[in-house]
Image (cartoon, rainbow, N blue to C red):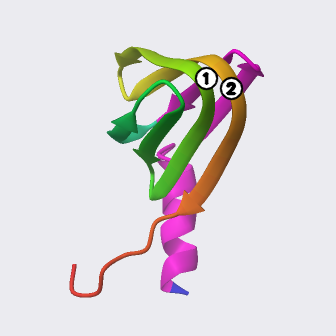
Amino acid sequence: MKSHLKEKLRDLAFINAFISIVDDRCAVIENVQNIVECNEIYVNIEASGFSIKVWGSGLTLSNYEYSIVEVNGNITGIELEKQRRISGK
């Protein structure tokens, strides 16, 4: 019940992670909290309790403003993983 209420509040507050895939050359991720790692073949971004991993070649980040990140390059895959909370935190 508590997690269901938390999800509803998240929906109402517009703090969910949004991923817009423009094509295989661009993906826009909104409500970014942290850029964990970025190199030419892999980008790992934390957004709204999820870890978003982008795979490809020639990857770069741009437009990191207002919690929005644009991933550019040859995108071959996007993986979404719910982050686990550490008990006691």
Q: Which mark is residue 57?
A: 1
Quick check: 29 left or right of 34?
right
Report the front residue among 57 and 65.
57
Quick check: 42 left or right of 36?
right
Quick check: 60 left or right of 33?
right
View extreme (left): residue: 88
Q: Is residue 72 above or below residue 87?
A: above
State which tag comes first along the sequence, 1 or 2.
Answer: 1
Give the image location of residue 38, x and y in percent: 40, 32
Residue found at x 45% / y 58%: 49
Residue found at x 53% / y 74%: 5
Quarter residue 35 falls in? top left
At label 1, which amino acid type do we have?
Ser
Residue under pointer 2:
75
Q: Dot 1: within a 10 Å radius of its alpha carbon, few (fewer than 14), some, or many (20 or more) residues? A: some
At label 2, which amino acid type do we have?
Ile
View extreme (right): residue: 23
Q: Secondary structure at mark 2?
A: strand
Query: For residue 71: magenta?
Result: no
Quarter residue 32 falls in? top left
Residue 17 in sight from this viewpoint: no
Q: Which mark is residue 11?
A: none
Residue found at x 44% / y 46%: 47
Span shown in magenta: 2-30
